[in-house]
Amino acid sequence: MGKGLTCVCFKSRGTYERICINLTPLQEERLKRLKHRMKFNFDASRVEHQEGLKALWSATYPGQELHGLVSDQWKEMAWQGEDPSTNFRGAGFISLENLLFFAKTFSTFSFSFNLLQTSFQCLLKKQGGKRAAWEYPFSVAGVNITFMIMQMLDLDASKEKNISYSECKIFDQVTHTHKMQEDSCNPLDSSMDLEQKAGHLSEPFSCRCCQNFLYAFSENEWAFDLLYCVASVVMDKQWLEKNATYMQFNDVLKSTRAQLEKELLMDDVLRIEDMPSYTLLF
């Protein structure tokens, strides 16, 4: 095999289709770094992971003191419980990095720390459109978005096979306070297939999306994080258009993935910034 030629295996209808993509040295290096980021589970005992949580709090609530890494304050950010570290098992440390990137890139503050209404804060506070009585928790949903994008781009096959999706329960807190009468209606029924819960669609789409994403990666080393931000606003838009409730979260996640795939496959989309839905961030 020639130097620089990287083979990537894509799953297609129960089999594996081998597609060889000739990566540039830049693409190969950036893809390697991205996959390296995806290897790390969140570890509350690691100082850098603790600092990541503190940075997320500071970016979200500048000037507001955080009382501790375990605190009821985290519920303001729509984490489940008072310990946010327990929410990252579904996608690992990169999901915290994605949230932090979103908060820092698409939130602007005045000198007096009065928050301007940017996309991150609007989604966090559910300020746009007609909201449902039972909303999706923004931060925990973000972990699921990270996991969905990794699957869509075939970037983390090991986690797709080994992680039980029940580890990333979206609505535990809600279902405890609003118990469903029928277990079959629970959007996180453990009997549901992992790929269905992550919005798994046709793999041939994913193969082409992965290739097109690599082109975008050449233009911007933060392409994955930008795609996460786009996915977040697309999901909220889908949520509002469907008048969804928390029981429909998985359906909304699937339609979000479908929209991302559609846009990534457009001929004139060479960067994440070229995606039509990118404008929703402003």
Image (cartoon, rainbow, N blue to C red):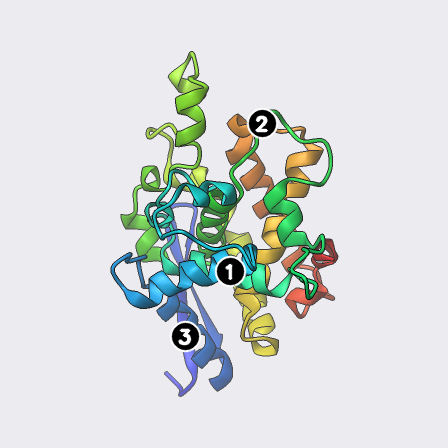
Q: Amino acid at mark 2?
A: Thr
User: In the orientation shown, which residue stands out farthest toward the left?
Assistant: 45
Contact check, label 2 and label 1, Cβ < 8 Å? no
Depicted 281 relative to depicted 34: above or below: above
Identity of the residue drawn at 68% across and 42% down: 237
| Callout in the foreground (3, 1) | 1
The numbered mark, 2 or 1, whose residue comes first in the sequence reads 1
Return the residue at label 3.
33
Spatial CA distance of label 3 from label 1 is 26 Å
Question: Mark 1 falls on what kind of element?
Answer: helix
Crowding around mark 2 (Cα neighbors within 10 Å: few <14, some 14 to 19, many 20+) is: some
Residue 187 visible in this rendered orientation of the protein: no
The numbered mark, 3 or 1, whose residue comes first in the sequence reads 3
Q: Amino acid at mark 1?
A: Ser
Question: Which circle marks residue 245 in the picture?
Answer: 2
Position of residue 62 measured from the top left corner of the image (x, y, whole percent): 56, 59
Position of residue 36 measured from the top left corner of the image (x, y, whole percent): 36, 70
Residue 161 visible in this rendered orientation of the protein: yes
Crowding around mark 1 (Cα neighbors within 10 Å: few <14, some 14 to 19, many 20+) is: some
Q: Quadrant of residue 170?
A: top left
Contact check, label 2 and label 3, Cβ < 8 Å? no
Position of residue 93 measured from the top left corner of the image (x, y, whole percent): 37, 59
Q: State the residue in front, 41 or 3.
A: 41
Return the residue at label 1.
58
Q: Is 93 displayed left or right of 208 in the figure?
A: left
Spatial CA distance of label 2 from label 3 is 37 Å
